[in-house]
Image (cartoon, rainbow, N blue to C red):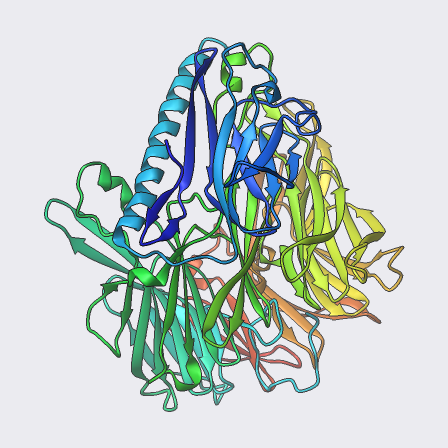
Amino acid sequence: MKGRHYAGGIFLLVVILVASSLLFFGKKVEVNAASTVLVNQPYIVHLSQSLEKDSVKKGDIYVKNGKGQKVEASISLHENRQSLSIVNTKTGNYVLHVEKNAFEKSTTKTKTQKIEYTVIEKIEQLQSIKDLENFFKVALSREKRNIEKAETTMAEESSNVAADKASGEPNHSTTNNQVEDIEEGDIVVTDGRYIYSIIENEIVITDAKNPKSMKVAHKISLEKNSYPTQLMMKGNTLIVILDQYIEMKKKDYISSINMTKAAFYDVKDAHNPKLIREVAQDGYMNGVRLTNGILYIVTNKTPDYWIMAEREDVELRPYVYDSAESKSIKPMDIKQLSILPGSMEPSYTIISAIDVNNFEKSEVKTKGFLGGSSTLYMSKDALYLTAFNYLPATFESSKMISTDMAILPMASDTDIYKFDIDGTNVKLAGTTTIKGNLLNQFSMDEHNGYFRVAVTEGNNWGMVEQVSKNHLLIFNKKMEKVGEVRDLAKGEKIYSVRFMGDKAYIVTFKQVDPLFVIDLEQPENPKVLGELKIPGFSNYLHPLDENHLIGFGYETESRVDSFSKEPIVTTTGMKISLFDVSDFSNPKEQDTVTIGGRGTYSDIQYNHKALFRNAALNYYGFPVTIYEAKGDYEIAYKGTGALVYEITAEKGIQLKGNLIKNAQKGEQYEDYNSMITRLLYIDNTLYTISPKEVNSYDLQNFKALGNVKLK
């Protein structure tokens, strides 16, 4: 099948699915690759049959240009010997040739594989609905083939088996953002007088002017099938990010659409907030960011393309909505849609930008990119999105030759897309593909024009054990790799990452917690300066100052399982660590505190926004629910609430406020409505927010001051 289509004179970026006419042990050789790639970026090709180790060196794999002439290209064979990376330095049409001698198990009938692809300078917009339909038809065909492949394989196998700053600090809490001055949405925000909270399907506004006599100023009720997820403040504007489900009745079926909406409220009079404007875009929210007065919204959308197998009237374009223009949703213009180079995912990443400083009249700029996304990171100059790039998998067993040829889901590589941001203008600037997967947004960082990323490569899947490896990679502005540190803590995986200027701190874990200190001052030559091994691990690292880090995670213990009699490592209580990294070559755990026992947990261990901070007092707090071990396997509930610590380099970790409500007699587990979700301060008062109520405390002695019920 041909791997490219032309429409309106513009090359359509579609997925190549090449099936040779040759059978090998009854299997067709499959090629899985995209049809385009940006210049100087790796073009990835996955094959269903293994290649010889020296096939590239021997010249059995090469590239020709559109004129049939061999051209220079950087070709590398991946460790699995079923994937190739090709880098071309010039734009144009190319053909990758994989000679029959390149295949490890070639037969007399094996023929050369030829894969056509195009190297482009920049992405091009789609020109017609037909282009879009062709893309999804190829995706549908690919999925059908993969399902058939998996079913055949299973049948065969069945018989075989940023540091906080006190200066310029506002008189109230702010969200604990990853990057300074780039706001992230949260479930609770304050403007220094009022507290805005998401409580089930409402936005509750609490007047906290008098902490001893708080009142509910107003409750914003949302329309049916609308569910708030994030709040942001910009002056007197409250931005509510919400999910909205819309039912679309078609001729013979009902389709549901999930929209991500931003609702702008004027809260100058918080007792009477006014809805001014709503904008929405198709898909589930990936993330929101607010910087320099511009709100960026990123969503992921998979259209109902599978219906194309039965009918033709399928709307494949994402929907958008703007209350300033219309009362109903509408599909995006085809010229707002592009295909990300190298993408094979039948889904969209949708990016919108709006100027919040003039949100009543400003234009919403929305772009849709064919290709899904997962993790989001934003610097002051760029937006980075990652996407899974699933690899073909084989069982590495000589007794299972038939399955050597099957393409099955497995661990993935990661595609990274960089978008330059200039106000409301968002433009794709570069892409790259790396081996392995990222933990979360803290695995990425940009500093002095260099993009840094920490990644874990390899995992256990099915019958094949792959030893995991951890790497730190550095890319320049063009997303070209310039430096790396490889093979950190083999057999372990990354649990937390923190970049601080020209240093990186990485925590891995399997049985002990190595903290790696990595020098990134010379991007082309990063170096591991020091390593600390201690029991337990940190899920989240927070900078205290230039020479100290706070780690939030778990304590662990090694013991013998009472049933299997095998040694195992289990988590015990929650752990806070203060790391001294002033001597980079010799990091130390300066102080540590363990909270509760096995089963104890806190939102801070998986959501950095749950961290309460007061830089003037050096206070750090978080919600926590406490359990204790009861024998080898059972746990006993002890209480829920919040804890506040003073953490300094001089005094270490000191408990200042214990706001835990102990379990009552017979109480076996925590009550959701009473669980504290966030802590914040206004002036000299601490506030705790739960679904049921807001409580206030004196920030100096933590004596209770007041209470107001929210429902």
Q: Is residue 456 left or right of residue 372?
A: right
Q: What's the residue at 49%, 52% (across, down)?
A: 374
Q: In this view, does 643 lie to the left or right of 586?
A: left
Q: What's the residue at 23%, 52% (across, down)?
A: 315
Q: In which quarter of the image is the N terminus?
A: top left
Looking at the image, which is closer to me, 27 or 384?
Answer: 27
Looking at the image, which is closer to me, 571 or 95?
Answer: 95
Q: What's the residue at 65%, 47% (across, down)?
A: 455
Looking at the image, which is closer to me, 576 or 285?
Answer: 285
Residue 81, percent across and down? 62, 27
Looking at the image, which is closer to me, 144 or 612?
Answer: 144
Residue 289, percent across and down? 49, 70
Residue 520, percent across and down? 78, 59
Residue 552 appears in the rendering:
no
Q: In this view, does 434 lie to the left or right of 581?
A: left
Q: Quadrant of the C terminus?
A: bottom left
